[in-house]
Image (cartoon, rainbow, N blue to C red):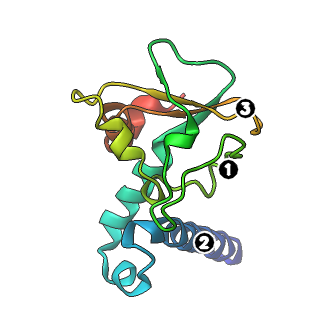
């Protein structure tokens, strides 16, 4: 019985940590307004957090059919500054909502275009922004992508 209680306690702690990380990660969506974030419905916050995480991956090659765009075309929504060519990718902190990635995706009206950014200063030389369609699909139907 004690063992079950201990495992349940660890599970709750892990879930709380993930929720807290999601809140920190999602703060740019609310323009840094922690009060708005706190009032936002938890299921919607979780969905948006998963969407933001699903938007990117790193790659050693340009995916077939991807549009290659300089990372310097991406703007930080908080500072208004463009990213530099020596930008180092950290997928644990890179928030889809903190930058104008959606503006770049909307250049392609059908939502099915993958965008690839050269990031030579990173562990992998390319940051890949999945298409709007694929990001949504991965968020709404994660079971389709379990390997």
- 38 versus 64 height, above or below: below
Residue denoted by label 2: 17
Question: At 41% from the left edge and 51% from the top edge, which residue is drawn?
Answer: 100
The N terminus lies in quadrant = bottom right
The image shows residue 42 at horizontal and vertical percentages of 35, 72
- 145 versus 21 height, above or below: above
The C terminus lies in quadrant = top right
Q: Earlier in the sequence, mark 1 or mark 3?
A: 1
Q: Callout 3: few (<14), some (14-19), or many (20+) C-alpha neighbours within 10 Å?
A: some
Q: Earlier in the sequence, mark 1 or mark 2?
A: 2
Q: Callout 2: few (<14), some (14-19), or many (20+) C-alpha neighbours within 10 Å?
A: few
The image shows residue 9 at horizontal and vertical percentages of 63, 76
Residue denoted by label 3: 124
In terms of depth relative to the viewer, which is nearer, 136 or 4?
Answer: 136
- 138 versus 2 height, above or below: above
- Observer-side mark, 3 or 2, equals 3
Q: Quadrant of residue 55?
A: top left
The image shows residue 38 at horizontal and vertical percentages of 38, 83
Q: Quadrant of residue 3?
A: bottom right
Q: Are marks 1 and 2 in contact (CB under 8 Å)?
A: no
Question: Please, what secondary structure does the residue beneath circle 3 have?
Answer: loop
Question: At 68% from the left edge and 46% from the top edge, which residue is drawn?
Answer: 87
- Observer-side mark, 1 or 2, equals 1
Cα–Cα span, label 3 and label 2: 28 Å
- 130 versus 50 height, above or below: above
Q: Residue furthest left?
A: 109
Residue denoted by label 1: 90
Question: At 60% from the left edge and 71% from the top edge, which residue is drawn?
Answer: 17
């Amino acid at each position: 019985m004690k063992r079950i209680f201990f495992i349940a306690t660890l599970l709750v702690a892990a879930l709380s940590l993930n929720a807290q990380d999601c809140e920190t990660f999602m703060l740019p969506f609310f323009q840094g307004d922690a009060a708005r974030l706190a009032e936002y419905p938890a299921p919607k916050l979780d969905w948006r957090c998963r969407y933001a995480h699903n938007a990117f991956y790193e790659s050693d090659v340009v995916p077939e059919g991807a549009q290659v765009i300089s990372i310097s075309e991406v703007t930080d929504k908080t500072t208004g500054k463009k990213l530099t060519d020596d930008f180092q990718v950290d997928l644990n902190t890179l928030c889809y909502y903190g930058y104008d990635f959606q503006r770049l995706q909307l250049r392609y009206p059908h939502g099915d275009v993958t965008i690839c950014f050269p990031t030579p200063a990173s562990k992998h030389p390319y940051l890949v922004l999945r298409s709007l369609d694929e990001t949504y699909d991965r968020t709404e139907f994660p079971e389709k992508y379990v390997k």
